[in-house]
Image (cartoon, coloured by chain):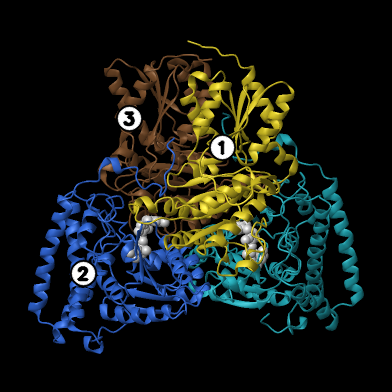
Chain colours: A brown, B yellow, C blue, D cyan
Amino acid sequence: MAREITYRDALREALHEEMDRDERVFLLGEDIGAYQGSYVVTRGFLEEYGRKRVRDTPISELGIVGLANGAAMGGLHPVVELMTINFSLLAIDQIVNHAAKLHYMFNGKFTVPVVIRTASGWGQLGATHSQTFEGWYAHVPGLRVVMPATPRDAKGFLKSAIRGQDPVIFIEHSLIYRNRGEVPEGEYTLPLEGAEVRREGKDVTLVSWSRGYYLALGAAEDLAKQGIEAEVIDMRVLRPLDIDTVVQSVQKTNRLVIVEESWRTLGMGAEIAAAVQEHAFDYLDAPIARVGSLEVPMPYAKNLERLVIPGKDEVLTAVQGVLARELVTVH
Amino acid sequence: MAREITYRDALREALHEEMDRDERVFLLGEDIGAYQGSYVVTRGFLEEYGRKRVRDTPISELGIVGLANGAAMGGLHPVVELMTINFSLLAIDQIVNHAAKLHYMFNGKFTVPVVIRTASGWGQLGATHSQTFEGWYAHVPGLRVVMPATPRDAKGFLKSAIRGQDPVIFIEHSLIYRNRGEVPEGEYTLPLEGAEVRREGKDVTLVSWSRGYYLALGAAEDLAKQGIEAEVIDMRVLRPLDIDTVVQSVQKTNRLVIVEESWRTLGMGAEIAAAVQEHAFDYLDAPIARVGSLEVPMPYAKNLERLVIPGKDEVLTAVQGVLARELVTVH
Amino acid sequence: MTSPDGMRTKELSMEKGQLLDLYRKMVEIRRFEENAAEQYAHGKIGGFLHLYIGEEAVAVGAISAMEPRDHLVTHYRDHGYPIALGIDPRPLMAELFGKATGISGGRGGSMHMSDPERNFWGGYAIVGGHLPIATGIALSNQYLNREAVVVCFFGDGSTNTGAFHEAMNLSAVWKLPVLWICENNLYGMGTAVEYVSAVRDMVKKAGAYDIPAIQIDGQNPLEVREATEKALEHCRSGQGPFFIEAMTYRFRGHSMADPEAYRTKEEVETHRASEDPIVRFSRMLTEDGVATQAELDRINADVEQEMEEVVRFAEDSPVPGPETLMDHIYAEPVPVR
Amino acid sequence: MTSPDGMRTKELSMEKGQLLDLYRKMVEIRRFEENAAEQYAHGKIGGFLHLYIGEEAVAVGAISAMEPRDHLVTHYRDHGYPIALGIDPRPLMAELFGKATGISGGRGGSMHMSDPERNFWGGYAIVGGHLPIATGIALSNQYLNREAVVVCFFGDGSTNTGAFHEAMNLSAVWKLPVLWICENNLYGMGTAVEYVSAVRDMVKKAGAYDIPAIQIDGQNPLEVREATEKALEHCRSGQGPFFIEAMTYRFRGHSMADPEAYRTKEEVETHRASEDPIVRFSRMLTEDGVATQAELDRINADVEQEMEEVVRFAEDSPVPGPETLMDHIYAEPVPVR
Ligand SMILES: Cc1ncc(C[n+]2csc(CCOP(=O)(O)OP(=O)(O)O)c2C)c(N)n1
Ligand SMILES: Cc1ncc(C[n+]2csc(CCOP(=O)(O)OP(=O)(O)O)c2C)c(N)n1
Ligand SMILES: [Mg+2]
Ligand SMILES: [Mg+2]
């Protein structure tokens, strides 16, 4: 039996269940308590669990992630909320030089089971508040990076992340908190690995994650009306990256379009393209296309912002491009 | 007429010449003065220029880059030294959310001509002191990112960076400071753009930058003895990225190996591979190969460290791989 | 509020015209913000919108003490400062509308106003991020012997950032001419000072850097002005930074999205009732006989009209041309890829 | 040095055995470091090597006051603390040699010793980075009612980092049981305190967080011990953090690569001559009649021998197996790509 709930509620359920299950799980972050959370994910939690377990913090991103690292080493299971992924840059030393390293550097003698929840997103927020850095975190051995698109994944991943022993960067998206989707009745967790083929197709593979997944899906539905069957893959987890699933799809469709919201250069799409051409070289009938944001600091004005973030049209154009391509061999 | 000097001396000459040319150029950073610079690049500068222009700073990476941004806005030309690129993570908010954004966000009304010198490198320095993040900076519109391999580029780039109006991330490498190379007699600057073919060849293209360039060159010399002519490209500038030069080479050689010291996943090589397959798809006879570090926090022990950083053998193996590859088309 | 309310206008050697100008600026800010809130509700303004209502006396009092050569750097709650500085409010409103005539061409939005010609270096959206930048501008002034002071505004919440600490220390070590003005409005977003700051009085933090500091009533523009004058003198004389903590209160939510779950309506009402800087100042002016209520009402009506025109200007302006999208990413040309 | 040298051993209720143990620990650290320097010169040790010579009394005095349930977190100059804690020096030296028997399996090196079984959570190489971590361990102790105190060592230089500020504030806001011990050795790498810190006395920085603080003579292990005992009591009683500034001096370069251009030989010699903690303490012990010089000499000889064995152990140990390279990147299995 399944229920339909929002992405936000899926996160709330995960936090509730894990906090109820294990006293050592606690939340910390800016404005998660009295303010009720800047994206309202933790509404009511302070009132329910009290100040010990729901900790409003100072504006000290570096300090609170470092503190969470230490608390995790000391036996707790902290879930930090960094209001947006843009502010995670202030904490990145504690994420990359500490959380990601300590288990290895100290020869496995202790673990750092910290979960860092943060939100990607945009919406006339200006240059410093509209970025997304999943590709940066996915670069770093020692981190697990998830970026769920659906309520089911959001809940199952968050519960696993909290129960796990490794540092997890858990990236939400401000524009999909209200998206609804099915989640299983009762308890479940999902392993932090594996892409999923969410729509089967034979003509072209569309790969994305988080909000981009919905964009890809929308494009696939349009394409279907034109008789083009797109296979849509939701990457779900960005480190470890499940390239096999993409390769298998490309072996069938022979064409790949990657859709993402970050700047194209060195976005996640770069890695996916590089890895797929390596593993499915002989199957590709066209260059892998990447659809991403224009390479510009995000402007505030709505009409300009619309030009920066890719929409369905850009995806459709890219698909037309890879489909139109004839395979030639030049020497 | 050319002279042969070290990479370090090339940097020193650039700093000297620019400081002598323009009173508004000044240096700041941790231990650049009394200590003489942790890689001795600024030796003697405090004594020569005094405390006003050679400023030993507190251990405040975020603060000093922010201060340099402000000083640049106010009409100075600060050259910040961040001891190593690992510590730049502490300053990354000022680099990415400020230096890279302000000119655009404020509609071009002022500029932020800041130069951030920092060093990549390794050598039993452990997990937190052996990383390299050029790919992260190359992801960000608004930044220029250079990573010179030769004394000539080091000097010419640094002078241009100081004279320019944009923020520049200038990445040196601790293991090539003593490398010698020719520099022109007298004044010169070099535009912050363009890759260079440093060795011509027809069988395979090797692409790298910074210390990796020497690795590629060494491999090319070995290959030559086996009758394999490798073309070697030094990327030099990582943003803007000169893909054309690589594409032209691949159109001739049909095979590409990228050599870098960072972790493979989402390293610069990912972008180069993704872009080249896009622009030279029909010319590739084998998947583009990427040689990079093993994906592990760097261990201290010398015998383990050697396994992590790619050496000539790894490059040769990769070249053999792309050469052995038969082009097949599967449907 | 720590200082007695009783500061009288006559204690200050100010002309009537100057006093009425302070009054007018506060009213301008208030009406500008109210109009912005209305336009936000109409969907004309997007993203974040942080209003300065209730805190007007801090910007107006402090900025009135600045000289043209001085510099201004602020956080994201930044509509009040340029108005206090006498910058035309029309491009400010147009910026909120995302129009080409906006002060940042519509690219910055609410959080990123600036006017370098007036030495206003902008509003910044990363909490704490502008403090090192202000320090650097101050260094450029010192370095180039400009004898200008940078006045930098920030909130209580930002004093908990590492950037605050590093900037304070740098400014003190190098004796930079920067005046730090902390607006302590008791909350950072929805979090009350006592839950997140080890000390309630921000002046105490200045002590860690031997920066002289004073806590003042930020609801009285004259007290703010006087303290700022003295502080600017200190900074200008080469003695290094100075720190003012202005006690104030935000009458509206943190941003338009704020349901204000963290404080009671009564708390807000109490502050509004006793500490509205405009109400207090108009009482001061009329009780001291500086102006009649009728004179003040005329100013109010005048500003009301001005703001109608401001909104109309924003409304009627064109959006930025799409062809400008990629301008100004770099100051110097970059080869196309 | 701010406190008079005259603290006598008899003022403290310590057994002779305990006093000699303090002495021995200091000598162990000194000899360990001297041997490390020698082995570095022989190329047996690579990378960075930061010696604790001259500062032994801080670690030994402070750690002698700790209880087994207490926790320890330090910066990268971290060979002295584990020795003071009584951890076997052989795996420490083996770590420097990059051997499998090293305390971190040869993966950490000089800057990353740790022994969580003894609540020693390690040395950290990012200046300031371990302060938030110490704060978090303290939170875990408070949360789980462990009644343990985290003792965290760091240098004067690290007090200028944003991480310091954020950690201090967090520790004070949540009244966490953490004892901050700042080793003020007058330099951060090659930069003297006065050039980079707005205040010379680090205790002043604790005032910004209302954290009680004391400045002590870090060259006298008994003074350090006494101050630490009181501070631990404070922390353990739920009153929150405490801050000790131990005035000390580094007799050797910052690391083995340091040519010491920033200070004169005379300056170093003056400190060495009057402030060697081992010399001072041995004088105290003999003058007070606690021990004879012969007894101390015996300890010295003993330690000398012990350290030969320590080096031999490191030398004879195997390097880590290449097959272990990819172990422990994650605590839980990750699917291979
Ligand atoms: C580094 C960073 N963290 C978090 C935020 C989100 N945020 C915006 S304003 C704010 C509160 C700031 O409070 P304060 O400094 O007191 O200023 P006030 O809004 O009260 O004027 C927060 C947490 C941000 N913009 N930047
Ligand atoms: C964030 C960061 N910046 C710079 C460095 C380089 N560095 C290593 S130790 C050190 C000086 C630290 O001085 P202090 O805290 O006084 O400790 P001491 O070495 O004197 O014991 C510096 C700058 C670093 N490791 N981390
Ligand atoms: Mg506030
Ligand atoms: Mg020191």
Cα–Cα span, label 2 and label 1: 63 Å
**Up-down relation of residue C265 to residue D116 (above or below):** below
Pick the quarter of the image with the C terminus of chain C.
Answer: top left
* Nearer-the-camera pick, B171 or D295: B171
* Nearer-the-camera pick, B22 or C32: B22
Q: Indicate the chain on which mark 1 is placed.
A: B
Circle 2 sits in a helix, a strand or a loop, which is it? helix
Residue assigned mark 2: C269
Labels 3 and 2 within one chain: no
**Marker disc for residue A314:** 3
Q: Residue furthest top?
A: B331
Cα–Cα span, label 3 and label 1: 30 Å
Circle 3 sits in a helix, a strand or a loop, which is it? helix
Cα–Cα span, label 3 and label 2: 51 Å
Q: Specify few, some or many for label 2: CA neighbours under 10 Å numbering under 14, 14-19, or 20 or more.
A: few
Judged left or right of residue A320, residue D147 is: right
